[in-house]
Image (cartoon, rainbow, N blue to C red):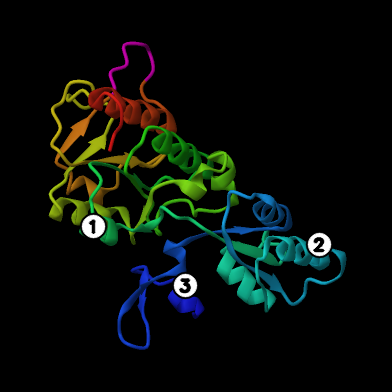
Amino acid sequence: MSVAERRSGNGTSCDGNGEQTVSPKDRFLTVYGRKPVLEALADPTLDVDKVILADTVRGAGAAEIQRAADASGVPVQRASAHRVKVLAGNGKQDQGVLADVVAPRMRPLSKALSARPPARVLVLDGITTPANVGMILRTATAAGIGGIVVPRRGVAALDPLVVKASAGVAFRAPVLRCGSAAEAAGMLTEAGYGVYALGASTSGSLFDTPLPGRAAFVLGGETAGVSEEVRAQVTGWLSIPMPGEVESLNVSAAAAVLCFEMVRRSGKSAH
């Protein structure tokens, strides 16, 4: 598969018969750098699809990675240093090696909506700090949220920093992929979801606002909040009551409150 297909805007490409196939970016989490790749290969709970090693990487470093891959039964492919940088999406820290780790619950948002749509979905909109994305993935997965939309544009890439912040949960999180948060809001609305945005100065309390059977919750970016494109599509706004002298919560903290309010409402799970 070409780099262009790997970076496909809609997450799909066509095979020789004209049928759509899912982009690798919607099937794998790519980790890069010698230590993260070796850790992934050493983790028996992870399914590493392949390792790609730059042809400039030689000597003891290459031998160590090759031994670890051989021990795990993972194929190693050689590629140009430029190709590794493009695939990793990080030209400074890839160290000439990356690994594609199978993310069994990651899939395109379109596929999730056409199969058995989850009742509760989070949508990340402009969240660019990897630590926040990772912590949201961990919290939402722990709370049993059925889907976390992580758009390819406008949100921190699903890279080793996100994986580290999630304490490894990112590999198993129910990540849903699409091009942008605005695209996700439109798709969710069309699928019958109420789309709610979290805001600090809105009248509707998260704790007592009635919700429909299917609801999506937009978490805005650290500085700009919910984008204008998404604002135009929301069903309503929800706030977290804060009687203390604090204007707002960090987005990952707000996500934790939201997720476990869904647990409270359901009595056991947010599915």
Secondary structure at numbered mark 1: loop
* Earlier sequence position, callout 3 versus callout 2: 3
Location of residue 20 (image quadrant): bottom left
Residue located at (56% from left, 69% from top): 87
Residue located at (39% from left, 37% from top): 140
Front position in the image: 111 or 159: 111
Pointer 3: what residue?
6
- How far apart marks 1 and 3 lie (CA) works out to 24 Å
Q: Residue 9 at what x, y percent from top left?
A: 37, 69
Q: Amino acid at mark 2?
A: Glu
State the quadrant of the C terminus.
top left
**Which is closer to the viewer, label 3 or label 2?**
2
Pointer 1: what residue?
115
Magenta residues, start to end: 240-246
Pointer 2: what residue?
64
- How far apart marks 1 and 2 lie (CA) works out to 42 Å
Secondary structure at numbered mark 3: helix
267 relative to 133, above or below: above
Magenta segment: does it hold 244? yes
Left or right of 56? Residue 33 is left
Left or right of 57? Residue 91 is left
Left or right of 142? Residue 86 is right
220 relative to 89, above or below: above
- How far apart marks 3 and 2 lie (CA) works out to 27 Å
Magenta segment: does it hold 267? no
CB-based contact (under 8 Å), mark 1 and mark 2 = no
Residue located at (36% from left, 74% from top): 21
Q: Amino acid at mark 3?
A: Arg
Residue located at (77% from left, 75% from top): 56
